[in-house]
Image (cartoon, helix red, strand yellow):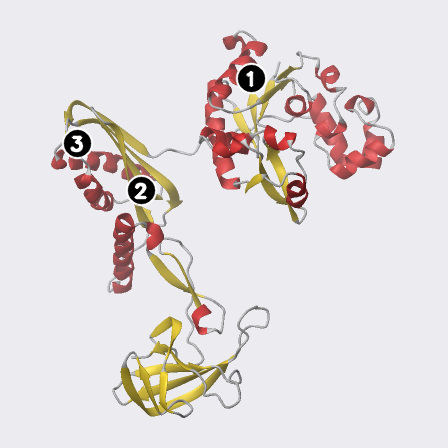
Amino acid sequence: MKRVMSIWFPRLPLDRLARRGDGRLSAPFAMTRFIKNAPRLTHLTEAAQDAGASAGQTLADARAICPELLTESVDEEAQGLFLRALWRWADRLSPWAALDAPDGLFLDISGCAHLFGGEEAMGQFALDELAALSVTARIGMADTKRAAWALARFTPSDINIAPPGGTRAAIAHLPLKALGISAKTETDLRRTGLSKIGDIETRKSSELARRFGLELTKNLSRALGHEPDPVSPEAAAPVYAARMTLPDPIGRLDDLCAVLRRLADSVCTRLEKDLMGARHFDLTVTCVDTGNHVLSVGFARPCQAVDAVLQQFARPLDELRIEYGADRFRLIARHLEPVRPRQHILGGELQEQAEDFDRLISTLGNRLGFDRVRRFLPQDQHIPEEEFTSIEAVRPERGIWENPPRPRPLRLFPRPERIRTLKPGRPPQSFEWRGRAFDNVSTCGPERLAPPWWVAGDRRQRDYWQTRTDTGEQLWLMTHPGSVAAGSPPEWFVAGLFA
């Protein structure tokens, strides 16, 4: 007979922080998510519950009850990765496991429970293993996936088992919400006096479907086993890694590079075969005296070339200090992306320049940090200092730079520099800037720009003039028209330098 186990992790975001030793968990603390146009509490510590906060409250209401409450938004990506790690862990219980996002797992345990001494012992083994990982869980077992899901979430004990053939009686006392129906359907059922699964399981499906929709009857049929609802696992993502264990420790740089070449050749061959590339490689070097040393390198574009991996690891290996040798090595490729094969064409100078630029970005990023190597992207703005933004150079975003309606300086100052007017004019005929005196030979302007109406702050208009001085410099002068008191001379600034 088919048997299904459902594992629910009610504190998954908090357990993820607990594994990191987060000290906030001993104080009033909660995780929040944006629900119904407001941040609401989803998971709380016991201290927060004792202070009066509860799940589902808006953050504003919770702070009014508990002013010292600390919060953090739920990291959906990190929680998903943590759940997938638990999914791989569940392979020790059953080879047939599936994700029940965002906080649960389904396992087909048919023919597996006897290996642990029965279903009760199997559930206790799972709880003990998860407790050792600092993960809180509740388990339900039944003949169907929907029934196991309901038992794990809507019964008070940690292990809830419906005996084979006893699913109907085991879930009869559970609330209708345990069927996974919508809140509207549950409200409609409560208004008619139906509050438990046992209240509707004996009624005709046609009547229930006509009054409350097909969702109710379909979920009820799946819970009772009248409709198939199998556990459908997905294949685990391939791991591109290679390891090597040596009989004797090594420490010379040439030997380390030779080992790395063999590992990189193994990993990159598999990547190339699957048309994949990695933006990140980790090399773990295990020394006989100091343990593991993890060396990491990144790439501006997905990499599957052995020589590129060796080139980026050359500096970290040279800086690694090994006194008594290392005998174990492991190279793993991370942050995988598909790689499309490109045909090399005659006269492909642009393609070669792009590849050289990516190699430069990779080298600089590994030495300085990829967060410090940035490039510019255009923005749809007319204010000069807001017409562009900077992002990390390794990010894949691309933008199309369009020619501005009027010339823009080669160098734009983030803060315009004030000048001292020597001979007034519009713009000044003679002025002093950076300790030097300049005379205007020719001018072009003005170009008037107004700030966006929706932006608070400085509401003054700006006039820009392109000027050529007697010393050859082409400057971009700026002033604020209409913002000077009567009788006072206008203030002028240098906003940029053309040449």
Name the spot of residue 361 as percent of width and height, x first. Answer: 29, 54
Query: Which type of secondary structure does the marked residue at label 3 adopt?
Result: loop
Between the residue at mark 3 and the residue at mark 2, the CA separation in whole angstroms equals 32 Å
Viewer-closest of 68 and 83:
68
Please give left or right for residue 186 compared with residue 441 in the image: right
Where's residue 78, x and y in %?
A: 48, 38
Residue 413 image point, x, y percent:
37, 72
Q: Residues within 10 Å of mark 2 (few under 14, many from 20)?
A: some
Label 1 or label 2, whichever comes before in sequence order: 1
Toward the top, the furthest residue is: 117
Position in image of residue 446 (x %, y %): 45, 87
Q: Nearer the viewer, residue 389 or 255?
A: 389
Residue 190, placed above or below residue 391: above
Q: What residue did someone put label 1 on? A: 109
Residue that appears at 67% across and 38% down: 56
Q: Residue at x 25, y 37 (%)?
A: 264
| Element under disc 1 | loop
Measured Cα–Cα span from mark 1 to mark 2: 37 Å
Residue denoted by label 3: 322
Mark 1: amino acid = Ile
Tag 3 and tag 1, C-beta contact below 8 Å: no
| Residue 332 appears in the picture as rendered | yes
Task: Look at the picture and state if 116 lies above or below 455.
Answer: above
